[in-house]
Each structure stands twice: as C-alpha cells, then as structure tokens.
Amino acid sequence: MRYSKDHEWVRSEGSGVAVVGLTAFAVDQLGDVTLVAIDCRVGDKISAGRAFGTVESAKTLSDVLTPVSGEVVAVHSELEQSPESVNHDNYGEGWLIKVKVSDPGEVGRLMDADTYAALLETAAH
C-alpha cells in the first residue's frame, strides 16, 4: 500500500490497476461519514492531484483527490447508500475507485507506510 500527502491510499491489484480509498487518519479527522459522492465514471480519465469526489461528515465536506493518473475502471457506487462503510472498513469495503494507472511510476513516488507514519507523527507535534 502507498499513501498520498492528502491522506488517500493506493493498493495495487495487479494488471496496472490500483484501488484508491481514504486513510484511517482521514476517516478519523472526518468523523462519521454521512455522504460519499464520486464525480467520475468508468472510462473517465483522471489526473493525480485532482478531485474525483467529495466526502461529507457531521464535521466537514472534503474533496477526495486521486493520487494517481489513469482511467477509472470501477466506481464503488454502493457507498452512496452505505457511506458508513468508509468509517467501518476504509481499507476494505470502503474503497472508492479503481484506476488503470497510466504511469506506474506515480505509485512508486507515493509514500510507503513508514514514511506516511512519519508524516503523521510530524503533523501531531
């Protein structure tokens, strides 16, 4: 798994496909997620660093940014009816989109778990 500075995670599924979701830190900061709106469809081209949806909670409304560029190959549309999946299983059933990555090097440039943990530790101080 790799992590963005914007608190999204990427997990490679093989065949150049990456699953994207929100990190536990992001979910904790949001609180109880009440709405997930994904603003892209299968076949759309997306660019790293661009918003592809929003997540709303009692605390805030936040854009979700894609950490990798490529073509959307799956959208977790069930989250519209069950946004709480992001809170309960953000690394599993709470995934947001799947992307056929156009530049595999982008994944490698994201943070590994240790680097991401260090970022969170630095932010806590």
Image: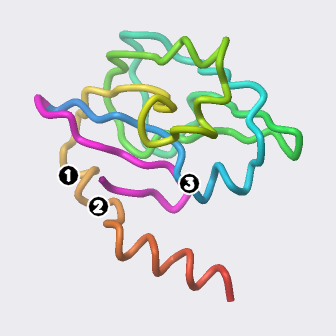
- Rendered image: mark on residue 20: none
Residue 98 lies, with reference to residue 7, above or below; the image says above
> Which one is nearer the viewer's eye here, 102 or 18?
18
Rendered location of residue 86, percent (x, y): 59, 35
Residue corresponding to mark 1 = 105
Residue corresponding to mark 3 = 24
> Which one is nearer the viewer's eye here, 49 or 92?
92
Applied colour scheme: rainbow
Pointer 1 or 3: first along the chain: 3
Rendered location of residue 22, percent (x, y): 53, 44
Amino acid found under the numbered disc labelled 2: Arg
Amino acid found under the numbered disc labelled 3: Ala
Q: Quadrant of residue 33?
A: top right
Q: Nearer the viewer, mark 1 or mark 3?
A: 3
- Binning the other alpha carbons within 10 Å of mark 1 as few (below 14), some (14 to 19) or many (20 upward) gives few
Marks 1 and 2, how far apart at CA: 6 Å
Amino acid found under the numbered disc labelled 1: Gly
Residues at discs 1 and 2 in contact (Cβ within 8 Å): yes
Q: Which residues are magenta?
A: 1-15
Residue 20 in the figure: left or right of residue 64: left
